[in-house]
Image: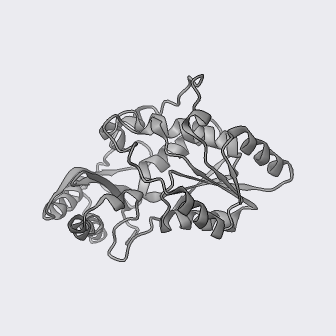
Amino acid sequence: MRIYEDPYLLQQQALAWRQAGEEIGLVPTMGALHAGHESLVTRARRENARVVVSIFVNPLQFGPDEDFARYPRPFDQDAGRLTALQVDALFHPSVDQLFPRSFKSAVDPGPLGDRLEGQARPGHFRGVLTAVLKLFELAQPKRAYFGQKDIQQLLLVRQLGRDFALPVHVVACPTVREPDGLALSSRNVYLTAEQRQHAPVIFAALRAAEAAFRTGERDAERLEQLARDRMAAAPGLAVEYVACFDEIGLQRPARAAAGNILATAVKLGSTRLIDNVVLGAGSD
């Protein structure tokens, strides 16, 4: 595995691979890798001749009161994991390398970027999509791999691809979970032992609502309330939102239907966690 810090050296290598007819799979990450990231890399390795993984803690997607400064950055450990997974290139630029002072542009995610996560974290998706677009230009991927836990991010990256006719197939990969159902996240390390004990209620609540859908409940507000009520029983857990929405407009449907998404954001202490299920898909 070769480590690239200079964006343009990575781009030159990616273009050489493309010219040789080798398809590239890209896995964008912020590091602090876990089994969820490994599942993305494993799939990319299976489906592409070359695999590029980026590790970049993107300051553009963090608000002023968020955890940019303390976000975990165990780079040597991450690099070892990626070497074992036979990654071809690890892209690890500094902020100044990816976004130099001369950088002035940004991607406007449109109205979908202001809902749900975008409402809770103003400017978040503007930062995400700006970084993703630059990564696509540098790594030249045929396919890019994103986890379904960050469902709104996934949908907006797909929109980015459609809107700009990018020759990149955005691949959705299932959420990887702990045995008790908690979705893997780099932020799980922030949880205290007591908070970690209560965290599985997030997925349990979503599954209870999804089970109600499978047995005939179609009122989206009722499904949201069912999940909200289940989570309310967990000490120290504050629900930011529970939302049932369609994939196109991220709007609550008049009647919930298979394929709609039930998503939530909560805080356990100071740690913010997100999760979701797809209605009609059973255990997600």
Q: Which of these two is toward me, 269 or 182?
A: 269
> In the rendered view of the protein, which quadrant contains the C terminus?
bottom left
Tell me if 270 is positioned left or right of 93 in this view.
left
Q: Is residue 189 visible?
A: yes
Q: Is residue 128 above or below residue 28?
A: above
Residue 130, quarter of picture: top right
Horizontal and vertical percent for residue 141? Answer: 69, 49
The single residue placed furthest to the front in the displayed view is: 76
| Residue drawn 27% across the image and 72% down it | 215
Q: Is residue 167 visible?
A: no
Give the number of callouts: 0
Query: Which residue does the image show at 22% across and 64% down from the upper left?
Result: 195
Residue at the extreme bottom: 179
Q: Residue at x 13, y 62 (%)?
A: 235
**Would residue 2 appear left or right of 16 to someone viewing this image?**
left
- The type of colouring in the image is one colour
Q: Nearer the viewer, residue 74 or 26?
A: 74
Judge whether 217 appears above or below 57 on screen: below
| x and y percentages locating residue 38 in the rendered image | 55, 66
Q: Looking at the image, is 36 positioned above or below residue 151?
A: below
Position in image of residue 269 (x %, y %) = 21, 54
For residue 67, what is the image quadrant?
A: top left
In what quadrant of the picture does the N terminus appear?
bottom right
Q: Position of residue 112 (x, y in %)?
A: 41, 37
Front position in the image: 169 or 19: 19
